[in-house]
């Protein structure tokens, strides 16, 4: 799926582009410097998304809630809607529900999420819990598309 793909552009239209920071949702692509760096880059994307509130509340607060709450099994075909609805972590599950249900035109959003994150080119997918442990909570979907292709990150943070 090239960077200019119609599905990726539609996902950004629904959930916001890389310019969104601090609250809400954002979709962006970031090149992985080498294989196996998806979580490291996801953490960097989380910090960038938080923007100025990262330092105001302190990295130790933001990272206190960080946890991988789901990893798609290697070689498994994706079903992002089921994966989001099936999250066992309560906080991440609520955020997943917001991404799926608290949006204009949910059917279009669901189809677009599936088209992007269920693409057979996805080499690995993880969902991380976000938040400061008090007011903010959310999740980050990180999808690795393999060598030569930027990873996709959907970041969602709410208060």
Image (tube, rainbow, N blue to C red):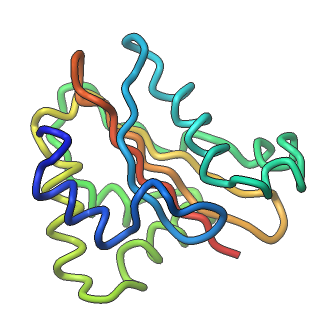
Q: Is residue 151 left or right of residue 148?
A: right
Residue 13 image-quadrant placement: bottom left
Residue at 68% x, 54% y: name it.
Answer: 50
Residue 16 image-quadrant placement: bottom left
Compared to residue 144, the image places residue 117 above or below, namely below
Compared to residue 84, the image places residue 39 above or below, namely above
**Residue 2 percent across, percent down from the top left:** 13, 38
Question: 122 or 148, which is in the foreground?
Answer: 148
**Residue 138 percent across, percent down from the top left:** 60, 62
Question: 37 or 13, which is in the foreground?
Answer: 13
Quadrant where the image shows the C terminus: bottom right
Question: 51 or 154, which is in the foreground?
Answer: 51
Quadrant where the image shows the N terminus: top left
**Residue 29 percent across, percent down from the top left:** 35, 41
Q: Is residue 83 left or right of residue 148?
A: right
Q: Is residue 36 left or right of residue 11?
A: right
Q: Residue furthest top?
A: 34
Residue at 15% x, 47% y: name it.
Answer: 4
Residue 33 image-quadrant placement: top left
Compared to residue 76, the image places residue 56 above or below, namely below
Residue at 14% x, 69% y: name it.
Answer: 111
């Amino acid at each position: 799926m090239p960077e200019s793909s119609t599905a990726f552009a539609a996902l950004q239209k629904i959930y916001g582009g890389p310019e969104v920071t601090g609250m809400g949702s954002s979709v962006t692509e970031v090149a992985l410097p080498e294989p196996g760096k998806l979580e490291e880059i996801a953490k960097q994307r989380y910090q960038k998304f938080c923007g100025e509130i990262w330092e105001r509340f302190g990295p130790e607060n933001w990272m206190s809630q960080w946890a991988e709450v789901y990893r798609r099994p290697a070689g498994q075909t994706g079903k992002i809607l089921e994966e989001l609805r099936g999250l066992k972590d309560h906080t991440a599950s609520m955020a997943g529900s917001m991404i799926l249900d608290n949006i204009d035109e949910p059917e279009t959003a669901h189809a677009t999420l599936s088209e992007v994150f269920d693409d057979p080119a996805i080499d690995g997918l993880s969902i991380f819990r976000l938040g400061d442990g008090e007011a903010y909570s959310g999740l980050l979907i990180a999808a690795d598309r393999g060598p030569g292709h930027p990873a996709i990150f959907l970041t969602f943070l709410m208060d």
